[in-house]
Amino acid sequence: MKTNLFYISIWFVWLGMALPACSQTSKNKTTMDTVNKSDQEWKKELSAEQYYILREKGTEAPYTGKLLMVKDKGMYRCAACGNPLFSSEAKFDSHCGWLSFDKEIKAGTIKTQVDKSHGMERTEIICGRCGGHLGHVFNDGPTETGLRYCVNSVSLEFVPEKETQTTDTITFGGGCFWCMEALFQRLKGVTSVTSGYSGGKIKNPTYEEVSTGTTNHAEVVQIVYKPKEIKLADMLDVFFALHDPTTLNRQGNDVGTQYRSVIFYRNEKQKEVAEEVITRYTREKVFEKPIVTKVEPFTAFYKAEDYHQNYYNGNSDQPYCRIVIMPKLRKLDHLFKSKLKSDK
């Protein structure tokens, strides 16, 4: 990463070849973050009742749903994949025996399809992320939307407003943490980016120790973000577009395990999203070579020395910043302009 002046001087010759490799672009395909699992996988993750409702399109008995009488403020999300579906503000008592809402929490979170079962034609509603059966929607709602989303309680999980997470944290390693820091600082919904070390076998490592490649720590950025403003899948699109996830323990001239491509997840949902994105990119052949990015459980993060923090913003005139980071920032602006903060 921080190569000596000899290497910086020859970069001017090498730049035309090395930068495209270091920031190898995908075909920049983006699709909706979806969850696709086999029946066996769903059976392992869901209770028998949840599997019957969500995957076999069953219906719970009226007036038996555990969420029917919940009056607290909060959010109702898919019990299978955690996709936010309804706000408590959209809930009303329709006296039909099932949960009723007059609108989804955000356009596109729910999909509809024709249901001709039981000798009638209805509009089925399914989770837009995992395809789980929720219930049906009718045009007899009492509010201005005119809709009544009739939903099985078993299909949902309720998250009280006081427990609704306003921020989340993810840790990425993609080569030089100066590069990663400068990129993610500019995204909407990102509240802080800290450079540091993760994944190694010693506590409180120094930069000099990590640079030897013997500690197994990776240079990483710890990102605190607001899930309501930016999705993890969107951040992963930026992550994969602006470093090369196909080179093992290397980014351009930066060589060693400390420069490996890695995602450290803090919960199963983050792991699931990361693996889904990698699977999708692989299936769609976004990269010519196989992705070598590792998805590993987060254990510890050690903040790097102060002079590494906010490095690009304080040293943009330095050769490394001009030669390596600036092209990545231009690419970020070109590919993800709508996701950037207005002051960046």
Image (cartoon, rainbow, N blue to C red):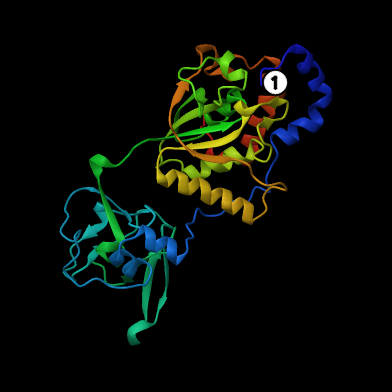
Residue at (35%, 54%) from the top-left corner? 105
> Would residue 135 be found to the left or right of residue 195 on screen?
left
Along the viewing direction, whichever of 104 and 231 lies nearer the viewer: 231
Q: Which residue is mark 1?
A: 322
Q: Is residue 229 in view? A: yes
> Would residue 146 be found to the left or right of residue 239 on screen?
left
Q: Amino acid at mark 1?
A: Arg
User: Could you say where residue 159 lies in the image, as x and y percent from the top left?
Assistant: 26, 48
User: Could you say where residue 225 lies in the image, as x and y percent from the top left?
Assistant: 43, 34
The quarter of the picture where the C terminus appears is top right
Q: Is residue 235 above or below residue 2?
A: below
Q: Is residue 182 above or below residue 264?
A: above
User: Could you say where residue 167 lies in the image, as x and y percent from the top left?
Assistant: 37, 35
Q: Is residue 234 above or below residue 51?
A: above
Q: Is residue 146 in view? A: no
Residue furthest out toward the right: 13
Residue furthest out toward the bottom: 119
Residue at (69%, 25%) from the top-left corner? 254
Q: Is residue 3 above or below residue 328?
A: above
Along the viewing direction, whichever of 37 and 96 lies nearer the viewer: 37
The quarter of the picture where the N terminus appears is top right
Which quadrant of the structure image shows residue 212?
top right
User: Could you say where residue 286 lies in the image, as x and y percent from the top left?
Assistant: 67, 50
Give the secondary structure at mark 1. Answer: helix
